[in-house]
Amino acid sequence: MTGSRIAAVGHYQPTRVVTNDDLAAIVDTSDEWIRTRVGIRTRHIARPDETVDEMAAAAAGKALAASGLAPARIDLVIVATSTAIDRSPNMAARVAARLGLGSPATLDLNVVCAGFTHALATADHTIRAGSATAALVIGADKFTEAADWTDRSSCVLLGDGAGAAVVVADDTTYTDGVPAIGPVVWGSVPEMGRAVRIEGTPPRFSQEGQTVYRWATTQLPPIAREVCARAKVTPEELAGVVLHQANLRIIEPVARKLGATNAVIARDVVESGNTSAASVPLALSKLVERGEIEPGAPVLLFAFGGNLSYAGQVIRCP
């Protein structure tokens, strides 16, 4: 068995930026109300004709270019999304066609907001098993298409976008014992699955906000510490923490309870809103692009959400 590492990342966001004041013109809310409760100032909203696979391919193309790999090297594409409208061809196959990748295995994965870290673990496991050598792992969602624009408690949260990573086989043994992609810790709380829903025709997003908040801030910190322990790194040794960008009032207490005192904490939710499966790779890609974390430094990726599912791993920053 071999290991794997993230060779490069990339992201994409639609050009249209919607402010809190813009939303206050269509629903009973205000900039102060939104910032106080969730920390969001702006979000990007896709055009009506801008599709999930279009955004996914844009982010993946940037990651692929940054990796230096030829498109033909990619033998696995995984797209994490919960907002694909069509059943077939799936988003991964459409991305492969857009990028001219040849004949990779293509699959979509739906774990809603926890999709990317589940997909990253799946790619890592596949490479370790010898069934792939280079994978594109993408989180992409057009979350605003599922928004109920009359519900001020939910529509103010949502944004659109995509983030991607190129994952390649890696045999490196690091002196500090931290693998390039650490063991995943994942699970769910099925009996509480209705706390976050995208249901109906057309599908609409809704959630039990207080239930999610209490669960996330009380149950997730010990799980995040377990992720670090599995990777043989202490929270104090983390250089970065990229949690699902759901709500600043969840991100900050979870990071504080984790004890990542020396880490850069991703707060992309402020400018991007909740982009579901895109949020972790989108935030990571921005940190890398801005040079806020040194290449090779340990970073915790940890996502949670729909199905009250969660998954996390410690990676080395590309």
Image (cartoon, rainbow, N blue to C red):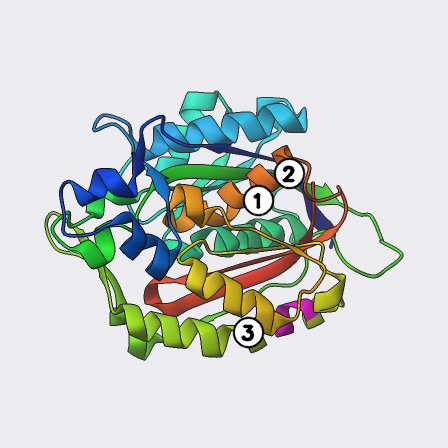
For the residue carrying disc 3, how many other residues have a C-alpha within 10 Å: few (<14), some (14-19), or many (20+)? some
- The spot of residue 97 in percent (x, y) is 41, 24
- The spot of residue 19 in percent (x, y) is 30, 38
The residue that label 1 is drawn on is 284
Question: Quarter-wise, where is residue 301 in the image?
Answer: bottom right
Would you say 100 lies left or right of 159 here? right
Q: Amino acid at mark 2?
A: Val
Q: Which mark is residue 288?
A: 2
Q: Amino acid at mark 3?
A: Pro
Question: Quarter-wise, where is residue 98 in the image?
Answer: top left
Q: Which mark is residue 137?
A: none
User: In this rendering, does residue 86 appear at all?
Assistant: no
Tag 2–tag 1 contact (CB < 8 Å): yes
User: In this rendering, does residue 128 appear at all?
Assistant: yes
Query: Range of the magenta residues?
Result: 223-228
Q: CA distance from mark 2 to mark 1?
A: 6 Å
Q: Is residue 74 magenta?
A: no
For the residue carrying disc 2, how many other residues have a C-alpha within 10 Å: few (<14), some (14-19), or many (20+)? some
Q: Which mark is residue 221?
A: 3
Q: Amino acid at mark 1?
A: Leu
Would you say 26 lies left or right of 215 here? left
